[in-house]
Image: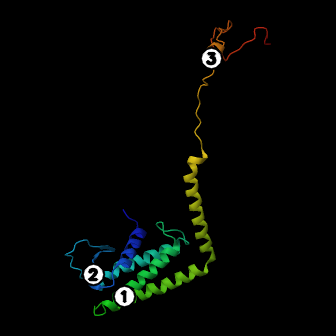
Amino acid sequence: MRTMDELAISNLRILNTLPDELSSFNLVIDGKELSISGDEKYDKIFDLKELEFPIYFSFQQLLNSLRFTSFQKIDGYKTSTLIKMINQSIDKVYQIIEMMEDDENSANLQEIIDDIDDKYVILKNRYSTCSFGKIFEAFNDHLDSACGYLAQSKEYLYFPVTFSVADDVDDEEVNEEVNEETEETNPNLQYDDDIKLD
């Protein structure tokens, strides 16, 4: 199951890939989810009322997530990438409203996207003036790169230890005498019978 952030990002990516001609839209609206129809016989007719909820949901979800995550990555996307994606999507919605200005709900969607645009400007200004957010993002990128390099270098850093018996050792050189005291046969145990323990 997709998270709300994943769904919002997917919706914005779909908005950004829509063609410039309204007649070429294969947009399928299912509640808060947008998708592209692969069916060539798709009706392609929608009204702006249907588009209000997925647009409102997608922008509000990402704006809130960016606000409360303190510029951390969301679903693998850096804050700067998401800010650019939001800006492109706002522009695309304005284009759609312009193309469908005869729709009776264009004023409602215009009001929604104007409010979203105002919030976007605040977020963008906050991001561009907050040096901590940029430092955090840069540090996070470098840390990700360092972790990736360490993961790749494991084959070069650790050498497997293998033990092998030397070929030049003769079996005759091994002294396998039986110890009289313990009756053990072990070439590694060498006892000196003359030494007495107290």
* Of labels 1 and 3, the one closer to you: 3
Q: Which residue is mark 2?
A: 24
Q: Which residue is mark 1?
A: 95
- Tag 3: amino acid: Asp
Q: Give the quadrant of residue 50.
A: bottom left
Q: Which residue is mark 3?
A: 170
Q: Residue 191 bears which disc, if any?
A: none
In the rendered structure, are the residues bearing label 2 and label 1 in contact, judged by CB atoms less than 8 Å apart? no
Q: Nearer the viewer, residue 82 or 126?
A: 82
Tell me the SS state at disc 2. helix
Q: Give the quadrant of residue 99.
A: bottom left
Question: Is the residue 41 above or below the residue 122 in the image?
Answer: above
- Tag 1: amino acid: Gln
Q: Residue furthest left?
A: 41
- Tag 2: amino acid: Ser
Measure the alpha-carbon separation of dots 2 and 1: 14 Å
Query: In the image, residue 34 lies at what x, y percent?
Result: 32, 74
Query: In the image, residue 164 lies at what x, y percent?
Result: 58, 28
Q: Give the quadrant of residue 16.
A: bottom left
Q: Earlier in the sequence, mark 2 or mark 3?
A: 2
Label 1: few (<14), some (14–19) or many (≥20) C-alpha neighbours in 10 Å: some
Q: Nearer the viewer, residue 20 or 105?
A: 20
